[in-house]
Amino acid sequence: MTSELPANAGHSEVESAFTMAFQPIVDLEHRTVFAYEALVRGQGGEGAAEVLGRVDDSHRFDFHQACRVRAIELAATLGMQTKLSLNVTPNDVAGQTECFRTAMDAAIRCGFPVNQLMFEITEGERVRDLPGLAASFDSFKRYGFSSAIDDFGAAYAGFELLSAFQPDVVKIDMSLVRDIHAKPVQVSIVKGFVGTCDELGIQVIAEGVEVEEEVKALRNLGVSLFQGYLFARPAVEALPRIAWPAP
């Protein structure tokens, strides 16, 4: 399912030039998998940044679409029983619904439940149309899929995005997670944020977790959903085995 991605790849070349890996998001309170995030990978194991760097900007939207479709196809083949988290850029979603329609069509074709799809908004670019973003999600929420904001606190106006659009899930960026057990300022920031999300009915995921001390500190703050190398690294075209901590 993979082949080398040529420089400035076009749509037809892109569709056969990559594959997807999956990393679990675990629920420690219930010791279950909450979701798997789909992450693009190159033929030689190259990460998302390197693969995306080979795609011409004019084909970037088509590439993102192809990634989501491939992830759904693989999830169905692997018999995934949890949510499948699919990355979307906010400006690909704001004011339009093609991303959702394409993913839903792929899920129906593959027999993957639409209500197990979770669309994860990456915070790597400034949102040009916040009302349009909220309207796009609201118009499709009746189909049962979930929404998430990725890398909250990493860049741009995170709280501005949250005030305009309240997702089902928010992922705390690893910059706030790393060594939180030894950094009281980060503890205070995350504590306040978790409280805000509780009031809004939003679930919180701590991402980039690498050591058990971070887990302990975050659990004391009320976080129960975690993603990071401590539990499992992404597995290409497979669901990785999870290293559960001792109860």
Image (tube, rainbow, N blue to C red):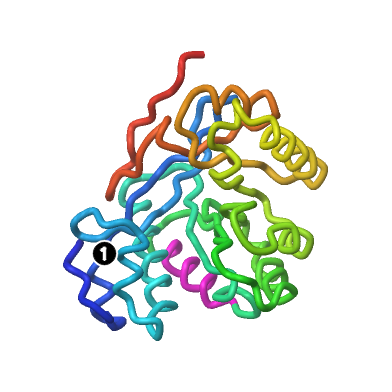
**Residue 106 falls inside the magenta stretch:** yes
State the image quarter where residue 12 is shown.
bottom left
177 w.r.t. 55: above or below: above
Q: Is residue 12 above or below residue 163?
A: below
* 155 or 132: nearer the viewer: 155
Q: Residue at x 61, y 56 (%)?
A: 149
Q: Position of residue 220 (x, y in %)?
A: 68, 23
Residue 201, by quadrant, is top right
Residue beneath the point at 17% across and 66% down: 3
Q: Residues within 10 Å of mark 1 (few under 14, many from 20)?
A: many
Three-letter code, disc 1: Phe
Residue that mark 1 sits on = 18
Coordinates of residue 25 in the picture (x, y in percent)? 49, 39
Give whichever of 96, 77 is nearer the camera: 96
**Where is residue 131 shown, x and y percent of the image?**
75, 74
In the rendered picture of this protein, how many numbered marks are placed on residues? 1
Query: Which residues fall within the magenta stretch?
Result: 97-108
Residue shown at 69% from the left, 63% from the top: 157
